Every structure is written in structure tokens, then in C-alpha cells.
Image: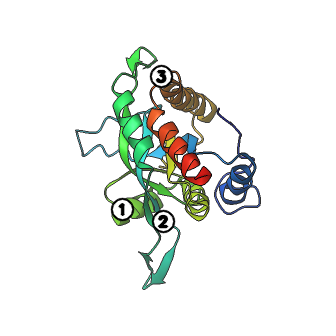
Amino acid sequence: DVVHFELPEQGSVGSDGSLLTINAAVGEFKPDAVILVGYAFGKDDKSDQSRSQKIGTVLISEKVADYESGKMKEDKMQSDGMICESGRQLLSAFKHYAKSWNYFINGEKANYEFGLLLSGDKVVDDPKFKKELFERYPRAIGGEMEGRGAYSVCRRLGIEEWIIVKAICDFGDGNKSVDKQTKQNIAAVSAVNFLNHLFTNPKAFEKIIKLDEKKKKKKLI
């Protein structure tokens, strides 16, 4: 069974942000796994020829870094926010089935990338701030706004399997408003298509289901 709901507010800490909303949803439905799907901003590192990020490229979290927490000292941010790992079984399934994902954007095969995602409540649309972020986290592949709240809920309530699947709709470089709706539509469809590829495979979440069955048996004993 799958429960889908849309967050009514961007970010993690608002009254309708991911922290409180996902906490309420998990309490109501008691899921075995949590998957965030939506938009992200990309790194777009043109100096690295191995990268091929474009609008619609799907970013999947191996780890998530909370870039908001830290200390300002001498006009510089010293980060001490959590860096947390995504669920092992979900990440394994996504890495395996991503290889057979075939989706085309304007006639060109869409890409995906696994790695470290940044998470904070700021809408990143400034080249200077973005540069500072990636200097603090040089291995990050992009960022979003709800992951740190989702992780906090999952950790507190004992949900080990969680992951972020978000497609690039902009590069946080001051051009967010240019063709915004078109780019967001491309990203939304790409991310959902990627997720649908897994959900339509009957074996994708087999290990998570088996783990849940084992837990239920232990409770009965």
C-alpha cells in the first residue's frame, strides 16, 4: 500500500513544513518507508566534464546534509549540521532499478545522479550564496528544502528506510524565474516517472516488505 500526500508549505520548519506534516502523516499511517519526491536545484558544475546535469535530471540522496545549522564566525559559516545516510534497502533498490529507467526529455534520454544532497529552508537563487554552499560541501550534487525535516521525523520514530528523489528545476544561480513553470513541470514529471519505474516493478521493495514481516513476527512472539 502507498500513501501519497502533498506538503502544503516549502521547507522543514514552518507550521505546514515537512517536519510537522510528515510527523503527523507517519503517526496516522505508520509507513515502513518514506520517499520525498519533488524539485531540487542542481550543482551544474561545468568544470567537471563527468557531470551531465540538466533540467529534469533526477537527484537521489545517498546522504543529506543540513546546511542551516552552524556558527557564524568572522563572517564565515562553520557548519555543524547533521549529515545522515538514506535507507540502505531503498538506496540499494533505487541504484539497481535506475539502470533500466528509460525516459526522454525533448528527445534526449534523461539522467539521474546519486550523491549528497543539501537541505535547508532557504530558497537558493543567488550565485554567491550557492558558491559558498558548495565550497562548504564540495561533494554535494544539489539541494532541496524538506529533507532535513523528513530525516528528523524518521529518526525520532524509528523509520530506517527513507530517501529523497527530486529532479532539477533550476540551478540556484539567479535565473529561477526564467521559464519557471515549464522547468518545474519538466522536473516534476521526470521525478515521478523515475519513481513510477520502481513502483511498477513487483520486486523493487521486496526486501523492505520482508524486513517488515520479520518485525511483525518478533512483536507477535
Query: As shown in the figure, which amino acid type bears the numbered disc 2?
Result: Tyr
Residue at image position (71%, 41%) is: 6
Query: As shown in the figure, which amino acid type bears the numbered disc 1?
Result: Tyr
Q: From mark 3 to mark 2, how far is it between C-alphas?
A: 35 Å
Residues 95 and 188: in front is 95
Instruction: Tell us which disc is closer to us: 1 or 3.
Output: 3
Residue 88 image position (x, y, % from top left): 40, 48
Among all residues in the image, which is located at the extreme front? 221
Residues 151 and 172: in front is 151
Based on the displayed image, in which of its 4 quarters is residue 178 positioned?
Answer: top right
Residue 114 image position (x, y, % from top left): 36, 42
Instruction: Look at mark 1 in the image and give the residue it sits on.
Output: 137
Asked if 97 appears above or below 49 in the picture, the reply is above
Q: Quadrant of the N terminus?
A: top right
Asked if 75 appears above or below 190 in the picture, the reply is below
Label 1 element class: loop
Residue 2 image position (x, y, % from top left): 65, 33
Earlier in the chain: of badge 2 and badge 1, it is: 2
Mark 1 neighbour density, 10 Å: few (under 14) some (14–19) many (20 or more) = some
Residue at image position (34%, 32%) is: 96
Instruction: Look at mark 2 in the image and give the residue it sits on.
Output: 67
Among all residues in the image, which is located at the extreme top? 107
Label 3 element class: loop
Earlier in the chain: of badge 1 and badge 3, it is: 1
Residue at image position (49%, 46%) is: 163
